[in-house]
Image (cartoon, rainbow, N blue to C red):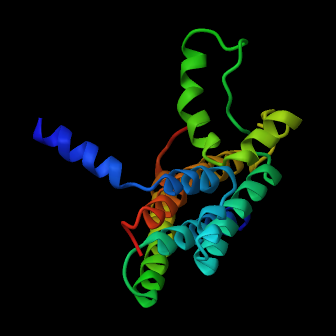
């Protein structure tokens, strides 16, 4: 009971703007920090995630997504890497809309590298998103 | 050589992000980012050599 009250009090303290900053940070890598005038940190975080995405695609990496073609366990196994890829925000949405990067290029030597670059780019953007949220909520300088 | 290059790029970019979100002074963050970069490179090279000697064919 006490922990519930503590939890709701902590939630109430979070300003609404922090949630918007979190969404912006997810949607466009680096934007969450730039909106808070953290120019250097925003450029570093956003730049790193953008470069990782571009390098990942150029190396022949592919983005994961769940489709109706996947049957049984195959579809389930796509979910976790897809969650990692979705971390790239609108970059993932753009690639999905333009059907870029969703085709496997297993014949390329560097395709596995590309996959890892794309997966980690999304995961790092989740980290950057949480950092931007914490700054906006006043939990971090 | 290309593999080492991409591993270094990966380690460098990851180190930048980890360093940027770390707490402390700018010097602490730089040190942490460089540490992450070094750890990725070192562990990658060690694992690479271990896998090289394993007779998987």
Determine the residue located farthest toward the left in the rendered image: A2
Task: Determine whether A6 is above or below B13 in the image.
Answer: above
Left or right placement of residue A49 versus residue B29 in this view: right
- The residue closer to the viewer here, A35 or A30, is A35
Horizontal and vertical percent position of residue A65 = 68, 28
Let me know if residue A98 appears in the view: yes
Horizontal and vertical percent position of residue A6 = 19, 47
> Which residue is at 66% across, 65% downward?
A46
Horizontal and vertical percent position of residue A87 = 60, 46
Horizontal and vertical percent position of residue B31 = 43, 84
Task: Determine whether A70 is above or below B43 in the image.
Answer: above
- The residue closer to the viewer here, A4 or A64, is A4
> Which residue is at 39% across, 70% downward?
A140
Viewport quadrant of the N terminus of chain A = top left
How many circles with numbers are drawn on the protein? Answer: 0
Task: Determine whether A114 is above or below A63 in the image.
Answer: below
- For residue A107, which quarter of the picture? top right
> Which residue is at 64% across, 54% downward?
A24
């Amino acid at each position: 009971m006490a922990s519930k009250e503590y939890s709701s009090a902590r939630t109430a303290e979070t300003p609404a703007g922090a949630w918007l900053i979190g969404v912006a940070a997810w949607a466009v890598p680096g934007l969450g920090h730039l909106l808070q005038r953290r120019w250097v940190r925003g450029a570093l975080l956003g730049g790193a995630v953008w470069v990782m995405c571009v390098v990942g695609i150029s190396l022949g990496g592919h983005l994961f997504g769940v489709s109706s073609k996947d049957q049984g366990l195959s579809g389930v196994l796509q979910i976790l890497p897809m969650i990692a890829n979705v971390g790239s925000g609108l970059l993932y949405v753009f690639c999905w809309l333009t059907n870029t990067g969703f085709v496997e290029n297993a014949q390329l030597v560097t395709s596995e590298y590309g996959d890892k670059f794309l997966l980690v780019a999304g995961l790092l953007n989740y980290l950057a998103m949480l950092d931007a949220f914490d700054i906006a909520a006043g939990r971090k300088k | 050589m290309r593999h080492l290059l991409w591993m270094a790029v990966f380690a460098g970019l990851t180190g930048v992000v980890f360093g940027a979100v770390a707490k402390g002074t700018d010097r602490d963050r730089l040190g942490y980012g460089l540490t992450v970069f070094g750890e990725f490179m070192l562990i990658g090279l060690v694992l690479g050599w271990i896998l090289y000697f394993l007779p998987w064919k």
